[in-house]
Amino acid sequence: MIDLAGTDVTALAWFIAAWLGFNVLVELTPLKARTLSYHMNMHRRGWMEMMSRRPVRIMDVGIAAGLQQGTGFFASTSLLAIGGCFALLTSTDSILKMMSDLGLKGGGNPALWELKVIGLTLIYAYAFFKFGWAYRLFNYATILMGAMPEENAPEEHRRIFAEKSAGIMVLAGTHFNRGQRAFFFSVGYLGWFVDPRVFMATTFFVVCVLARRQFASRARALAAALHQLPSAPIEPAGGMNTDTGSSNPFTR
């Protein structure tokens, strides 16, 4: 049985509490309305509403495909990180010797080292499941875009369909954010390989960075300010603007 020191237990408890607490803060408390994620979710809903009124939706499907590809990249990266963690497990002796030569406290107990690596593996496994589900949800969202009622459908029908489609898009974004959050907290987790006190400090640093991005970043301010701008008018089906800006007379 691995005998964890009191500082290790405290640092691990602080890490778990910080991660769970931050998730609750930005997703469940009233403060979520002030976050960057909340404002981007509002823009996602506006996007679906505007798309339901557009006669041509190729651009929208292309944007959704790009989001899906980005999510697939992070899912693949999670698998590579998991493979790297297994490589660490098979090189425990050499890594501990190197850490001992450097005078780092993390290089003393092989069982504790392996426990830390297993914990890091679980973080990346969690991220993979989140990215994998987000990838699937983005795929569902593109299907719903194709099934969106045409502009001549009843207004109420289009509105409800757009609202539900936006719900799928928001859910995909939520799971993607959770996967990215796991990546960020894995950086804080690396401090445990050096020292429990470093672990607590790196976890606090990650929380500060994430909190600033959600509540006080320039991106958040810009996303919030855009809600005050009027939407661009939708051209009628028979009078869409097809001007490409080219000097070719056949494109005018």
Image (spheres, helix red, strand yellow):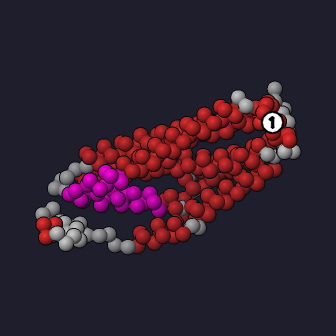
| Residue depicted at x 71% and y 52% | 203
Picture layout, residue 177 above or below residue 116 = below
Q: Which residues are magenta?
A: 39-64
**117 lies above or below 163:** above
Residue 167 shows in this picture: no
Secondary structure of the magenta portion, mostly?
helix
Quarter holding the N terminus is top right
Q: Is residue 171 left or right of residue 205?
A: left
* Circle 1 Cα neighbour tier, 10 Å, few/some/many (<14 / 14–19 / ≥20): some
Q: Picture coordinates of residue 193 (x, y %)?
A: 76, 43
Is residue 36 among the parts visible in the rendering?
A: yes
Compared with 205, 194 (above or below) is: above
Q: Is residue 41 magenta?
A: yes
The percent coordinates of residue 45 (x first, y second) are 38, 57
Position in image of residue 211 (x %, y %): 62, 60
Q: Give residue 140's position: percent from left, percent from top.
A: 36, 42
Q: Of helix, strand and loop, which one carries label 1?
A: helix
Using residue 23 as the reference point, say whether residue 188 is left or right of it. Answer: right
Is residue 28 shown left or right of residue 228? right
- Residue 109's place in the image compared with 20, above or below, is above
Residue occupied by mark 1:
96
Q: Residue at x 35, y 59 (%)?
A: 47
Q: In terms of depth relative to the viewer, which is nearer, 114 or 158?
A: 114
Q: Quadrant of residue 89?
A: top right
Tell me which corner region of the image, top left, top right, bottom left or bottom right, holds residue 104: top right
Which quadrant: the C terminus? bottom left
Q: Nearer the viewer, residue 127 or 248?
A: 248
Q: Residue at x 75, y 48 (%)?
A: 191
**Is 147 part of what is drawn in magenta?**
no
Location of residue 234 by image quarter:
bottom left
Which amino acid lies under the numbered mark 1 shown in the image of this protein?
A: Leu
Specify the farthest residue to the top: 1
